[in-house]
Image (tube, rainbow, N blue to C red):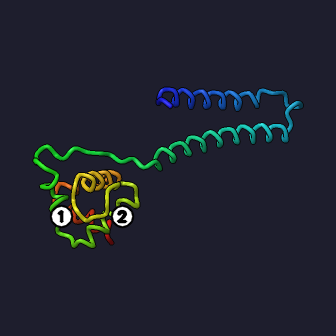
């Protein structure tokens, strides 16, 4: 749903809730006993909680969907093979490089073959993984790339 529509929907729900709560004390005391007031308050609370749970469910589902982001290599390098991520990756043993690719594939970032070779698929997978982990800055240096790879292996 578009953001303005969601905001309008929230405002409408809040306004209806406020109006229903405000109208309860105005009802005649004899017509609205404690049990009736408690029932109306319970229904209003259930409706509000249901809307909150629906919104949280939508947010969680949106976050859960694996999103692979393909990123162009940095403009200051001529090739992905000269990036700090590539240099760090190629310093690992073949078994470790394959383990990195296996873990990236298991988490939905890598779709290529588990061959231990650094290429565009591995590069895009590690960049997407670093973005999701909030560690994009680590890919600017070889030591930072080692930290990301070590986290994938160990």
Please tell me which residue is depicted at 32% across the width and 66% down the height of the picture: 152
Q: Residue furthest right?
A: 30
Q: Is residue 17 left or right of residue 70?
A: right
| Count of labels in the image | 2
| Residue corresponding to mark 2 | 103
Q: Does 101 appear above or below 78?
A: below
Q: Is residue 59 left or right of residue 46?
A: left
| Relative depth, front residue between 96 and 38 | 96
Q: Tag on residue 88?
A: 1
| Relative depth, front residue between 22 and 50 | 50
Quadrant of the image for the C terminus? bottom left
Q: Tag on residue 65?
A: none
Q: Is residue 121 left or right of residue 38?
A: left
Q: Please provide percent x and percent y for residue 24.
A: 76, 31
| Relative depth, front residue between 47 and 137 | 137
Please tell me which residue is depicted at 85% across the width and 31% down the height of the picture: 29
Please tell me which residue is depicted at 70% across the width and 42% down the height of the picture: 46
Please tell me which residue is depicted at 27% across the width and 73% down the height of the picture: 95
Q: Residues within 10 Å of mark 1 (few under 14, many from 20)?
A: some
Q: Please provide percent x and percent y for residue 73.
A: 19, 47
Asked which secondary structure carries label 2, the reply is: helix
Q: Does 12 appear above or below 33?
A: above
């Amino acid at each position: 749903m578009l953001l303005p529509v969601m905001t309008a929907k929230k405002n409408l729900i809040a306004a209806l809730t406020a109006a229903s709560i405000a109208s309860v004390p105005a009802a005649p005391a004899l017509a609205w006993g404690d049990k009736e007031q408690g029932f109306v308050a319970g229904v209003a609370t259930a409706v509000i909680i249901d809307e909150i749970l629906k919104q949280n469910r939508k947010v969680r589902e949106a976050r859960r969907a694996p999103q692979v982001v393909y990123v162009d290599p940095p403009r200051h390098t001529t090739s992905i093979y000269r990036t700090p991520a590539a240099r760090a990756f190629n310093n690992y043993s073949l078994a470790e490089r394959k383990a990195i690719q296996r873990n990236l594939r298991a988490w939905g970032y890598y779709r290529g073959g588990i061959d231990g070779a650094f290429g565009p698929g591995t590069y895009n997978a590690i960049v997407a993984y670093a973005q999701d982990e909030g560690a994009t800055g680590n890919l600017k240096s070889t030591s930072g790339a080692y930290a990301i790879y070590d986290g994938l292996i160990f």
